[in-house]
């Protein structure tokens, strides 16, 4: 493992100071550091300044708003989210997804904002410096080609976050602060499907909070497949939110992770108003198949990851339909 590169560190105490610090050329935000610091030790990135956000009180905490929605500060730890009584009662899928991230010691340090904005990963990228240099680097870092899809003009490194898909199916929004002021957008629009340009944040912008609307009769679940039952990123993950009225699907949202360069919503409109049966299950599975783009980016073979993703789709909706 390489030594950390040289950089300065700033620890602002207010959000305004943090935004100002991040506007500097070469500045990078530091939350819990569980993703960023290991990458820097591998030579993946050379920031001139790390902006430590741990002292910005405006980024922390969980609040129930007057309209019944939930607001979670981007600096809130995953452990706090997983154990928060109000989240477990009203939005249990958010708590369970947070509890599935990495291991207990990671969740103590890791923040919601850092988890959502984590770097994409690939077996050709997350290697030692000497290995990467021996292979001519890659499109994501110092090179000019993607080793996964050699003739591609974009990076196919994959996103492996657990919390994003769970929040996406709950129709969550993100609050963003930057030099131009504050803005809000649906969480799904924070991401773009390019492993090297994974976020839609403008230079100097920072994710400040997540807003989740009231559950309103929706039931949701998040499941993942990984090699070890702790620590590992998902080889494939799926979040589903379902609203049932009698024998028909009143609402269905589904998001996938671990297979594409971004967590993605799967088209489900064709199933709303229908009953959940074998035909509907096959329609949904085919929609997941078309949306996912499973490639050689992890230690597990492509065929396995695709098969478990499709199997989890059917199983998860079956269980939510029965519970509803």
Image: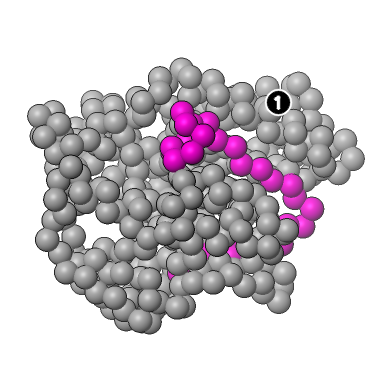
Question: Looking at the picture, does residue 213 appear above or below residue 158?
Answer: below
Q: Height in image: 200 above or below 65?
A: above
For numbered disc 1, what is the local secondary structure?
Answer: helix
Identified at 48% across, 62% down, the residue is 77
Q: Residue at x 58, y 70 (%)?
A: 62
Q: Position of residue 65 (x, y in %)?
A: 67, 74
**Location of residue 162 with respect to 10 vertically, above or below:** above
Q: Find residue 55 and report its horizontal and vertical position in percent.
A: 38, 76
Looking at the rendering, in which quadrant would you find the N terminus? top left
Give the magenta part as a residue range. 208-234
As for residue 103 lying within the magenta part, the answer is no
Relative depth, front residue between 106 and 275: 106
* x and y percentages locating residue 239 in the rendered image: 60, 41
Q: Is residue 58 visible?
A: yes
Image quarter for residue 179?
bottom left
Q: Please indicate whether residue 94 sits to the left or right of residue 156 in the image.
A: right
Q: Which residue is mark 1?
A: 281
Quadrant of the frame with the C terminus: top right
Q: Residue furthest right?
A: 246
């Amino acid at each position: 493992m390489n030594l950390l590169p040289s950089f300065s560190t700033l620890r602002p105490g207010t959000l305004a100071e943090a935004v100002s610090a991040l506007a500097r050329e070469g500045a990078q935000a530091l939350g819990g550091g569980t993703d960023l610091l290991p990458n820097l030790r591998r030579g993946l990135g050379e920031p001139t300044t790390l902006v430590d956000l741990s002292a910005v009180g405006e980024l922390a905490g969980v609040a129930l708003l007057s309209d019944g929605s939930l607001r979670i500060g981007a600096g809130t730890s995953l452990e706090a989210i997983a154990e928060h009584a109000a989240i477990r009662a009203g939005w249990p899928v958010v708590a369970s997804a947070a509890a599935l991230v990495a291991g207990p010691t990671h969740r103590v340090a890791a923040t919601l904002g850092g988890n959502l904005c984590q770097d994409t990963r690939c077996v050709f990228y997350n290697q030692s410096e000497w290995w990467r240099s021996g292979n001519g680097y890659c499109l994501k870092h110092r090179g000019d080609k993607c080793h996964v899809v050699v003739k591609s003009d974009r990076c196919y490194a994959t996103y492996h976050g657990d919390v994003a898909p769970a929040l996406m199916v709950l129709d969550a929004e993100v609050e963003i602060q930057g030099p131009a002021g504050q803005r809000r957008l649906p969480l799904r629009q924070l991401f773009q499907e390019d492993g090297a340009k994974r976020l839609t944040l403008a230079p100097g912008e920072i994710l400040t909070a997540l807003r989740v609307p009231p559950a309103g009769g929706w039931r949701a679940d998040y499941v993942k497949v990984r090699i070890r039952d702790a620590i590992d990123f998902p080889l494939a993950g799926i979040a589903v939110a379902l609203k049932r009225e009698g024998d028909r699907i009143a609402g269905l949202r589904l998001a996938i992770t671990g297979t594409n360069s971004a967590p993605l919503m799967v088209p489900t409109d064709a199933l709303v108003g229908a009953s959940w049966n074998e035909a509907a299950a096959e329609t949904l599975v085919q929609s997941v198949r078309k949306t996912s783009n499973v490639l050689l980016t992890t230690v597990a073979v492509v065929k396995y990851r695709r098969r478990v993703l499709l199997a989890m789709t059917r199983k998860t909706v079956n269980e939510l339909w029965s519970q509803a």
